[in-house]
Image (spheres, helix red, strand yellow):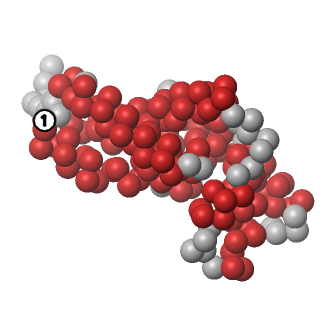
Amino acid sequence: MLVLNTRITKLNAKEYNNAVELYADNIYRFALKHIKNGALAQDVVQETFMKVWLKHEDIVQEKIKSYLFTTAYHTIIDSVKKEKRSVDFDLVDKSVMSDAFADAESNNNELRLLLDQALNQLPEIQKSAVLLRDYEGYSYEEIAEITSLTESQVKVYIFRARQSLKTHLKEHNLVV
């Protein structure tokens, strides 16, 4: 019987701080794409890192990225549920939308707005899967780990999300 000498390294303060530097911006973008509110997205990042720090002694260093995004994903879901209880999402805050796209080129504004609207119409799990894959560049395996789905389920959700986005763009004669 062959036993491999693998060392499991738990997360320490230095590695935690390194993870903050490496992944805080990515988690912020991920949260912002979901909730469209910069302050709320910052809160998600803060809460994610707080939760991770509280459990840092139980986290394997090599899995920190996955653990962070899993925690952020669940924090976003909780935040969205909380917001749905207090806000009617049918009302669109035009000032938030214009702030989000202020620095984009004028010819891309319509496409970005339509994609954003289409993303917001997706079921939460499809939206998360497609954002993790297409915006953050995660593999199917990593997305499965983050969302607690199988790889097959992830592929199906991403396929369905892309089909929905494509249909939405076709309706507006903006097929990419």
- Left or right of 12? Residue 144 is right
Above or below residue 173? Residue 90 is above
Residue under label 1:
12
User: Can residue 162 be seen at all in this image of the molecule?
Assistant: no
63 versus 22 height, above or below: above
Q: Is 71 in front, or is 1?
A: 71
**79 or 129: nearer the eye?**
79
Residue 155 falls in which quadrant of the image? top right
Position of residue 141 measured from the top left corner of the image (x, y, whole percent): 46, 39
Image-based side of 110 in relation to 40, left or right: right
- Looking at the rendered structure, the secondary structure element under dot 1 is loop
Q: Quadrant of residue 13?
A: top left
Which residue does the image show at 69% across and 56% down from the upper left?
116
Question: Which x, y percent locates residue 97?
Answer: 66, 59
Residue 103 position by quadrant: bottom right
The 10 Å Cα crowd at callout 1, few under 14, some 14 to 19, many 20 or more, is: some
At label 1, the amino acid type is Asn
